[in-house]
Image (tube, rainbow, N blue to C red):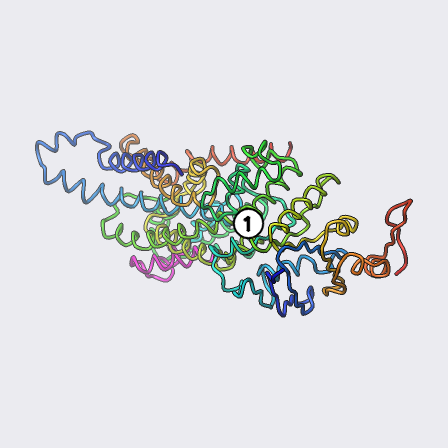
Amino acid sequence: MTRKAWLLIGVGLLMAALASLVFPATGLADLFRRDQALLWAILIEVRLPRMVLALLYGAMLGGSGAAIQALFANPLASPDITGTTAGAALGSVVTAYLLGFASPVGLAIGGVAGAALALVILMALAGTNSDSATLLLAGVAISAVAGAATALALALAPSPFAFYEAYDWMMGSLVDRSLPQAGFVAGPVVVALVMLARKAPALDALVLGEETAAAMGHSIIALRRQIVIATTIGVGMAVAVCGAVGFIGLVAPIFARALTRGHPGRAVLPAAAVGAILLCLADLVVRCSPAGRQLPIGVVTALLGAPFFLALVLRMRLEWRA
Amino acid sequence: MSTALTARGLVLAGRLERTDLTLESGSLTLLVGPNGAGKTSLLHRLADIGEGEGMTMLGGEALQRMPPARRISQIAFLPANREIAWPLVARDLVALGSGGRANPAAIEEALASLDALQFADRRLDQLSTGERARILLARALVARPAVLLLDEPAAHLDPARQIAIFERLRIEADRGAAVLASVHDLALARNFADRILVMQQGAIIADGPAQVALAPEIVATVFGVAWNDGKGWIRVSA
């Protein structure tokens, strides 16, 4: 990637982060004159954790999306399309409402376990290097089962408010999150992203096929294992705190590969940066939506991301026909 | 000539019987045998790909313990499958053969030696089978490895292009590489090989220069064919 592209991404990240603190700006100037203590409280206690979580979660989705796409040699793979986020949401819901461990650590363990289960089932169903149809079918099946199981878990939950409360996990939310929560997610996400970024050369070698990558000294089994571990830890933790957010993991790698001349491995870090920017912007849309009702962030990313997904499917159909 | 590769105890259950093999620097060895004879399995075991047993020594060092950065200059493997999932620019794909570290002069030379410069800036999905075969071969050659293992480098190519591929491999052998390639065309094998390995049911059953390894009785037993000057290859009962 050129220095100019990195600069572009860096500036984008900075602007998205700043915008996340400043907007919506209505009343901020007034507050600055009247009550600076309250202004700082809003910025540090309310907006900062939200910005940090949006950046971390977006980066995790983008980075893991790029790595999973490179591993499966398929631009349609991503944590949400393949059912990983749905699995994590199921894990969190079951842990909180059926097992009764609603502590952050309990939720996180549940989320990671759910994500791991979903990815392992995906590998068993589709294998790596599978064609798009198999991968998508396996992902749809896992998402459907996880969604149904989540609804079942909520229906069986002792709390009558379970459905209402769990809305966050199913649609995603960055509302009312605290700095400790953001710090709780930061460690695992950073570790997971470093793990994925270190695999960039192996993922690029995988472009030449599994045989050639193996002959070049990249252990395919180890590569697969590390990407699954990094993705389940990072995505599982993030979902446990912020719920399931779709389409960032699908769309961010597309932009990133445009910056890396199509190389899927070296697109992992740029995809993380693009994912962070996209989720920040999606959260801005949520916060600037008409007063009274806030849209769930998962709905915003789906509305903005779905057209990309449809375009990808359409392009593949046209290629098959050609 | 010096020994470039020594392999001991190569085994792949059900595919490859216990095999030992030595390859000399500066020689072009061609691997022939019917479908399912174990040619790909032998190449895989030599290149440390996938499951199985055995040890491959390159210049006194075990391939199995060699890190990726060193392997690139020691050994290159070209698979029979030419499907590439990501539509990279051809030149970028060749660069992957040098481990991502840009070496523009070597890339240019590899492309030029295969007459591939004129389509090097096109994307892989826009290339014909023959053009793609040349780009993938350039990828295997770009780091100038001491040992080249190629699985059917001439498959699906027209006769002139098949000959061109083996002429290019001859040049690699002449610069000092140990080249081992599998091939189905016995006439090509006879014309280009310093040494021929004949495989049948997971074992090397003949090894030597063409006139020995491809003697008519061996060809008849292994392949069930004989050469007829008027008709080409004809079927015979083994």
Q: Which residue is label 1 attached to?
A: B144
Q: Chain of mark 1?
A: B
Q: Main secondary structure of the magenta part?
A: helix
Q: Nearer the viewer, residue A75 or B163?
A: B163
Q: Nearer the viewer, residue A3 or B230?
A: B230
Q: How many marks?
A: 1
- The answer to whether B12 appears left or right of A114 in the picture is right
Q: Nearer the viewer, residue A171 or B151?
A: B151
Q: Position of residue A35 (x, y in %)?
A: 9, 36
In which quadrant will I find the N terminus of chain A? top left
Give the crowd class for mark 1: few <14, some 14-19, many >=20 residues within 10 Å: many
- The answer to whether B31 appears left or right of A251 in the picture is right
Boundaries of the magenta span: A89-117
Q: Position of residue B27 (x, y in %)?
A: 66, 55
Please tell me whether mark 1 sits on a helix, a strand or a loop. Answer: loop
Q: Is residue B220 magenta?
A: no
At x 75% / y 64%, what residue is drawn? B201
The residue type indicated by label 1 comes to Arg
Q: Position of residue A71 (x, y in %)?
A: 50, 50
Which quadrant would residue B83 be assigned to in this image?
Answer: top right
Q: Is residue A219 above or below residue A201?
A: below
Q: Is residue A95 magenta?
A: yes
Q: Is residue B207 above or below residue A67?
A: below
